[in-house]
Image: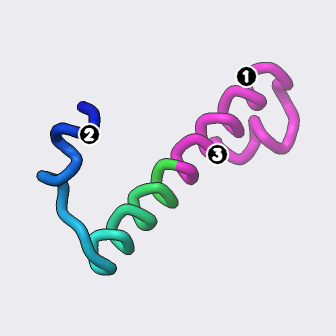
């Protein structure tokens, strides 16, 4: 969106915590996706067994 819209975004320490929490959930989702993909590549491994 750029600098023209940056002032419209919420600011402050509370919103920074919300942003960090969202980033943690996003990282966890990517980690689960990576484990699932490795499970597909290596059938029978721990990664594959973790989703059964």
Q: Magenta-highlighted stretch: main secondary structure?
A: helix
- Alpha-carbon distance for marks 1 and 3? 14 Å
Query: Could you tell me which quadrant the N terminus lies in?
Result: top left
Q: Residue at x 17, y 53 (%)?
A: 7
Q: Residue at x 37, y 62 (%)?
A: 19
Quickly name the residue at label 3. 31
Quickly name the residue at label 2. 3
Question: How busy is the neighbourhood of tag 1: few (under 14 within 10 Å), some, or many (20 plus)?
Answer: few
- Alpha-carbon distance for marks 1 and 2? 42 Å
Residue placed most toward the observer, 28 or 18: 18
Magenta residues, start to end: 27-52
Given this view, does label 1 or label 2 mark the residue nearer the observer?
A: 2
Residue placed most toward the observer, 11 or 18: 11
Q: Residue at x 28, y 70 (%)?
A: 15
Tell me which label, 1 or 3, sits earlier in the chain: 3
Quickly name the residue at label 1. 40
Q: Are marks 1 and 2 in contact (CB under 8 Å)?
A: no
- Alpha-carbon distance for marks 3 and 2? 32 Å
Residue furthest bottom in the image: 13
Instruction: Classify mark 1: helix, strand or loop.
Output: helix
Tell me which label, 3 or 2, sits earlier in the chain: 2
| Magenta stretch: includes residue 35 | yes
Q: Is residue 48 above or below residue 15?
A: above
| Magenta stretch: includes residue 38 | yes
Instruction: Classify mark 2: helix, strand or loop.
Output: helix
Rendering coords of residue 25 (x, y %): 46, 56
Rendering coords of residue 9 (x, y %): 18, 54
Q: Are marks 1 and 3 in contact (CB under 8 Å)?
A: no
């Amino acid at each position: 969106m750029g600098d023209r819209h940056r002032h419209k975004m919420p600011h402050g320490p509370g919103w920074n915590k919300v942003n960090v929490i969202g980033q943690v959930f996003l990282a966890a989702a990517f980690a689960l996706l990576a484990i699932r993909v490795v499970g597909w590549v290596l059938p029978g491994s721990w990664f594959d067994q973790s989703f059964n």
